[in-house]
Image (cartoon, rainbow, N blue to C red):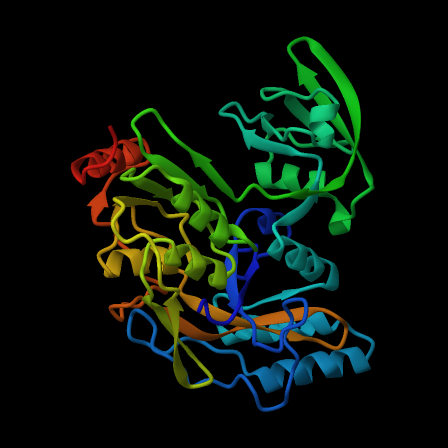
């Protein structure tokens, strides 16, 4: 069974705002979770500190102090979230964070693989310009005629040139990410410049994409582990031609629902251990479902953006000798966070444990070193050579 459901939170260590669009980090929820927020019960979730990858005890937040500080602040007419942030900051919990009600609601939508936007992917060009990288078919931007390569100069009158792409994405999504709201884009294509009004809508994330290159392999790209992504990986493997090797691309995958990562592991394993984790002072395990395809050649692409649930999957496939991993060392986010509701509706997430790969290796602060090292430009080609050597392709 996949085990308990872990929830995704798009952020980096103690970051908010524009960073919410960039990284997915993993937190754990209990079986009593409602909308990914576990019911709170006094005295629960007080685990024995686990050792970090460097052998030291990880920093932990005193959850009783956290709740007390937030409640006192609210009683005095102050911000409970701000008081909680101060407690988290003092604790040294690297992955601890506090989110307001709107941010957390958007996270819950992200768990379902949905987001609010206009159907644009943007990137920052070498000259500092923000340009359209991709237009989602059928989305608001597509219907308005926007194209890849169009220059995005401003969003709702706020210039985005020479700004990080994440800031442009944050502006495109808007305050509270509410579907139906309007956003105005200043666009330029060649010598033509115009203002385009678009209405935001709810879109499904394209977190799993499958291609079949001419070399006979099947390339499965997993951008994040949102609901249903694990089963889509299994479906892609089942649909692959007999004997065809699989190139599983986890580069830039910031994590997500651990249950989905375990389901993805079940596509390639015939049951058995995927990972262990400590929580409430107990060691627990995550296991794959039986019946996976254990004979098909498999190579996994990794890089420094491979995090959390994606590292859990990569570690399982590597440790159990099921795949050859290729690329560069992963990020090293192997900690588990538990969300707690605060009196003002905000949510605090604090570290409660860490997970390990089937061989017992710690991930947090260490990452996973691939079997074969390769830089970004040559990693995919090297992985294809591996698959060829394993007997895949025509």
Quarter of the image with the N terminus in it: bottom left
Q: Which x, y percent locates residue 209?
A: 48, 38
With 253 as the anchor, is 385 left or right in this view?
left
Q: Which x, y percent locates residue 177?
A: 74, 48
What residue lies at 29% left-to-right and 56% top-to-bottom?
317
With 363 as the anchor, is 143 left or right in this view?
right
Residue located farthest toward the top when viewing the structure as drawn = 191
Residue located farthest toward the left when viewing the structure as drawn = 389
Q: Where 307 sits versus 353, above or below?
A: above
Q: Where 115 sits versus 218, above or below?
A: below
Q: Which x, y percent locates residue 257?
A: 51, 60
Q: Where 87 sits versus 211, above or below?
A: below
Quarter of the image for residue 341 reads: bottom right
What residue lies at 55% left-to-right and 83% top-to-bottom?
62
Task: For residue 367, say whether it is visible.
Answer: no
| Of 366 and 119, the residue lying toward us | 119
| Of 125 and 178, the residue lying toward us | 178
| Of 168 and 3, the residue lying toward us | 3
């Amino acid at each position: 069974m996949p085990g308990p459901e872990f929830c995704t939170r798009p952020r980096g260590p103690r970051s908010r705002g524009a960073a919410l669009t960039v990284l997915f980090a993993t937190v754990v929820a209990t079986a009593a979770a409602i909308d990914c927020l576990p019911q709170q019960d006094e005295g629960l979730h007080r685990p024995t500190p686990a050792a970090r990858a460097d052998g030291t005890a990880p920093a932990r937040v005193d959850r009783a102090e956290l709740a007390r500080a937030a409640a006192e602040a609210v009683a005095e007419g102050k911000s409970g979230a701000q008081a909680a942030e101060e407690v988290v900051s003092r604790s040294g919990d690297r992955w601890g964070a506090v989110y307001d009600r709107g941010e957390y609601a958007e996270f819950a939508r992200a768990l379902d693989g949905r987001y609010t936007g206009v159907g644009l992917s943007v990137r920052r060009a070498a000259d500092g310009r923000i340009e359209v990288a991709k237009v989602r078919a059928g989305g608001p931007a597509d219907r308005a005629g926007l194209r890849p390569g169009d220059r995005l100069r401003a969003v709702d009158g706020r210039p985005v040139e020479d700004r990080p792409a994440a800031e442009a994405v944050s502006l495109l999504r808007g305050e509270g990410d509410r579907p139906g709201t309007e956003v105005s884009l200043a666009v330029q294509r060649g010598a033509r410049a115009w203002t385009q009004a678009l209405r935001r809508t709810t879109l499904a994330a394209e977190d799993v994409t499958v291609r079949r290159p001419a070399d006979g392999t099947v390339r499965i790209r997993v951008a994040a582990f949102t609901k249903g992504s694990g089963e889509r990986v299994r479906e892609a493997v089942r649909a692959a031609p007999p004997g065809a090797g699989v190139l599983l691309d986890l580069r830039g995958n910031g994590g997500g629902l651990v249950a989905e990562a375990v389901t993805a592991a079940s596509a390639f394993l015939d049951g058995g251990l995927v990972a262990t984790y400590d929580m409430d002072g107990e060691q627990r395990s995550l296991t794959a479902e039986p019946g996976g395809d254990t004979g098909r050649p498999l190579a996994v692409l990794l890089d420094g953006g491979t995090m959390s649930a994606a590292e859990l999957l990569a570690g399982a496939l590597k440790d159990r000798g099921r795949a050859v991993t290729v690329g560069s060392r992963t990020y090293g986010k192997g900690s588990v966070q538990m969300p707690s509701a605060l009196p003002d509706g905000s949510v605090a997430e604090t570290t409660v444990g860490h997970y390990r790969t089937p061989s017992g290796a710690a991930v947090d602060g260490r990452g996973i070193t691939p079997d074969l090292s390769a830089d970004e430009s040559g990693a995919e080609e090297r992985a294809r050579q591996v698959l060829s050597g394993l007997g895949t392709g025509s």
